Image (cartoon, helix red, strand yellow):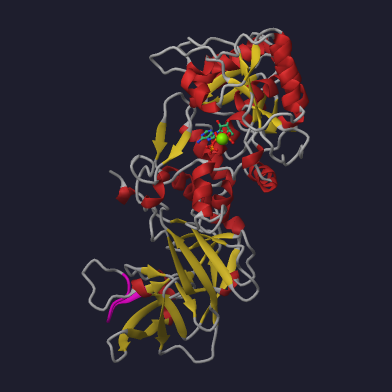
Amino acid sequence: MSNNSNNPESTPVTHFILNRIRDDVAAGKNGGNVITRFPPEPNGYLHIGHAKSICLNFSMAKEFNGCTNLRFDDTNPLKEEALFYEQIQNDVRWLGFEWTELRHASDYFQQLYDYARELISNGKAYVDSLPAEQIREYRGTLTEAGRNSPDRDRPVEQSLDLFERMKNGEFADGELVVRARIDMASGNINMRDPVIYRIRRAHHQLTGDDWCIYPMYDFAHCVSDAIEGITHSLCTLEFEDHRPLYDWILDNISIDCHPQQIEFARGNLDFTVMSKRRLRQLVDQGHVDGWDDPRMPTIAGIRRRGYPPAAVRQFWESVGVSKSESIIPMGVLENAVRNELNETAPRVMAVLRPLKIVLTNFPENETHWVEAARHPQNPDFGQRKVPITRELYIEQTDFMLEAPKKFFRLKPGGEVRLRNAFIIQCNQVIQDADGHITELHCSYDPDTISGQPGASRKVKGTIHWVSAEHAVNAEVRLYDRLFNATNPLADKQRDFSEFLNPNSLETIADAVIEPSMADANAGDICQFERTGYFVVDQDSNDNRLVFNQTVALRDTWAKFAG
Ligand code: ATP
Ligand code: MG
């Protein structure tokens, strides 16, 4: 692994694609240039899987001082929305990459039309009037050859005329299509005269109503790549069977660029789904609170969750690039996040479920300020001042009335150190009529604070705390995995939404935090000591802080494994 992977310009780990490009450059192919592209369809938000492709495309170009275009593959106006064009650009930038040129397949609609005409002119494509169901039927199966459409031998002039009239809007949607004339008996079904143009009266985000015919993906993609002079067209494995078509189209039109398509395995994570269509379903059906819900595997979701972009880059780099499909445990991604935040997140004390303690020998109306490091290993973070008063909050889980022997936090008669401060002893437990513990009366040992002779006195447990008087109230959102199943798509009989985890969000309305966080802004990340990493959510306002749990301090996924 590269030791400098937090830097998007660092040298990537070697893999078959890097080797292949290196060979091409060494052989002087494409004049030694490397031009890649990231080609999303603007039909939803990007997800962590897309980040793999983004990291790969941008890092390959960087490695050879090449260029990477961001190209919107916007050939299906029914599914595309203006919002997604914007969001995708934000997401790519957030990941730390800047494209050379912003392009759109729709920029090339005229050229695509002209290349389709060229195919028709050369007898390599024809206008077909078979209805869609029949085209499917005629296509044959894996074991049976397809049959030629009756229109396959339509005279070229007639096809050219019909194509022009399709463009002019003389036919209804679906009435005619243009098909490449390849081989209805091909062992590769993609080569059995694939449709390359269809009629679709839909308003396009960028070209408006200029066109009522739109190119199919397989046609638009390779031609767009070639127009942009892409040298290496990196895509996921499901396009392997489309490569012969990619090559066929470019071999049969008069374009002098022929990019090399290279396929790699998709990135998949367990306990989630990664496809815009399915993520959209979660949003539309209200299972989550929008595309940027912190439980979503979208780039917008993980950003709001507090994942640092460097961790996402590091994660995909460590996973590597190969041709074999795998599902990566979510714990691996979380570890990358934890490792990064351990270095970069300042520490604070926050109590999620407060239990009040009264230090009976601490003067009333007095505040003692203790100095605490913002980061235990990195003095560059500096110090903060934390107030300590007679009344404090500690975590309910840090006290047990009837504690087992190994319980080293607070118990009746027991001692514990308050982090960054002194040792306290629990003298009295106050309960209400129902037996609920309402507060603890403790005494503190002033001799054990930093600078005093007893500062080094050891007790087994150290717990965090917040001054009741100075506490800043906050809402804290804790997250669990979005699905209960390792692969929510495995059961074909059931919709993946049936496997949603009903307890994926827990909201704590009245957590308390030390006052150094009072002026925190959305996006600020910190470690709540002993608890986990948290980020200030955009829902925060002047009166109320809201924190999202980014990741717990320790791996909470291991228990679900196997
Ligand atoms: P989705 O089903 O999520 O819409 P897609 O492949 O249809 O995925 P596109 O917008 O067409 O989405 O994808 C843009 C690029 O991202 C493509 O090159 C695609 O291969 C790549 N990509 C999509 N999902 C993944 C993934 N899970 N891992 C790696 N690359 C991916
Ligand atoms: Mg798609």
The answer to whether residue 452 is magenta is no
Please state the total of marks drawn on the protein image. 0
Residue 342 lies, in percent from the top left, at 50, 52
> From the viewer's perspective, is 326 left or right of 471?
left
Determine the image quadrant of residue 124: top right
Q: Which residues are magenta?
A: 409-416
Front in this rendered view, residue 264 or 343? 264
> From the viewer's perspective, is 518 left or right of 409?
right
Image quadrant occupied by the C terminus: top left
Which quadrant of the figure shows ligand 1? top right
Front in this rendered view, residue 514 or 263? 263
Residue 264 lies, in percent from the top left, at 50, 25
Q: Is residue 428 above or below residue 76?
A: below
Residue 203 lies, in percent from the top left, at 72, 41
Note whether residue 428 is visible.
yes
Magenta-colored segment: predominant secondary structure:
loop
Q: Kindly identify the residue that appears in the image at 61 percent across and 15 percent down.
A: 180
Residue 236 lies, in percent from the top left, at 52, 27
Q: Kindly identify the residue that appears in the image at 53 percent across and 78 percent down.
A: 471
Q: Is residue 34 above or below residue 292?
A: above
Front in this rendered view, residue 427 or 30? 30
Q: Kindly identify the residue that appears in the image at 45 percent across and 62 percent down.
A: 478
Determine the image quadrant of residue 269: top left
